[in-house]
Amino acid sequence: MAMDERPIEREPADGRSLVGLDRVTLSTRSVSYSDVETPLTGALYWSEAQQRARPGILLIHGGAGLDDHARDQARRYAELGYVVFAGDMLGDGVAGSRERVIGCLTALRDDPALLVRRGQAGLAELARCPEVSGRFATIGFCFGGMAALALARSGAELAGVVSMHGSLATPRPAESGSVKAKVLVCHGAADPHVPMADVAAFAEEMNSAGAEWQLNMYGGALHGFTHRQAAPGAIPGVAYNPHADERSFAAARTFLTEAFDDASPAARGDR
């Protein structure tokens, strides 16, 4: 069920100079959906300039839920011309309560099947949107990066999966041949929450699975380097890094263009 449709006017946030560029008009609507008996509420963003169906991106929030950071990132990618669904992994009434949030995150982290199912619920809702062309990708931040990679490991039919400063460890590694999506991981080299041992183990896992993957590391960047809202020193090991933010966004932009091009009917030889 969709509701609350309204336009948003923003400057383009595509990593280029804004000089000479028109403002981008985005529309958004709140979307109610569910994962079995868990009610969820996400938000859909798309550009009014697009006159035809476009590839869809499921954007998965960090540990705080569908907050200002997740919504800003959804707008950022919608400004590139994609239809972006900022999904809800926690459920209605969970965000805002530290105890409920931690309980939900722990349950999802410890149960890969539940984590994948919750993400698949968002993808299914995105697929129902008439603005979407039928090609899909997923991008996640922090906890959302872990969730996005879980979808890739599960064999989800996605053109691409992007993890931004996400957790790389998993209790259920990818099996050989299971990863169908192209994978991009953007990682802060100084992230104390995702040690280099996890990075090395992830690389070995992806190679063993035969995945098409790449990993970008940003020197000096801590965990959460895309979080403009992060208060300096509020959470140990978490800090905004403008250089890593812009470079990772540029990497994701190029990656998504290539992934969606390769997943197009013409590239696949579809008739």
Image (cartoon, helix red, strand yellow):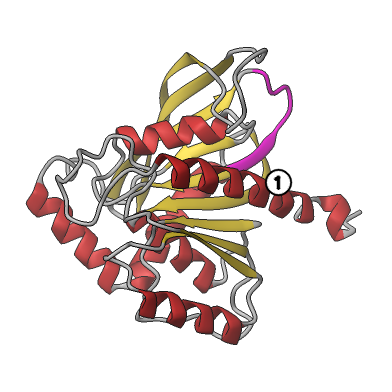
Q: Label 1 is placed on what type of residue?
A: Thr
The quadrant in which residue 36 appears is bottom left
Label 1 sits on a secondary structure element that is helix
Q: Which residue is mark 1?
A: 257
Query: Would you say 13 lies left or right of 195 here?
Result: right
Identity of the residue drawn at 27% across and 65% down: 193
Q: Quadrant of the C terminus?
A: bottom right
- State which quadrant residue 200 falls in: bottom left
Q: Nearer the viewer, residue 47 or 40?
A: 47
- Rendered position, 119 above or below 69: below
The residue closer to the viewer here, 217 or 70, is: 217
**Of the pair 58 and 234, the residue shown nearer to us:** 234
Magenta region's main secondary structure? loop
Q: Is 170 a magenta residue?
A: no
Return the x and y of residue 172 as percentages of the image width and height.
40, 81
Residue occupying image coordinates x 45% and y 49%? 122
**Is 128 displayed left or right of 87 in the figure?**
right
Q: Position of residue 259 (x, y in %)?
A: 70, 54
Where does residue 108 sit, x and y in percent of width and height?
28, 65
Name the spot of residue 33 as percent of width and height, x first.
Answer: 38, 42
Q: Residues within 10 Å of mark 1 (few under 14, many from 20)?
A: some
Tell me the magenta residue range. Answer: 49-56
Q: Farthest front residue? A: 220
- For residue 63, say whether it is visible: yes
Residue that appears at 26% across and 73% down: 110
Q: Closer to the camera, 154 or 3?
A: 154
Give the quadrant of the N terminus. Answer: top left
Q: Is residue 51 magenta?
A: yes
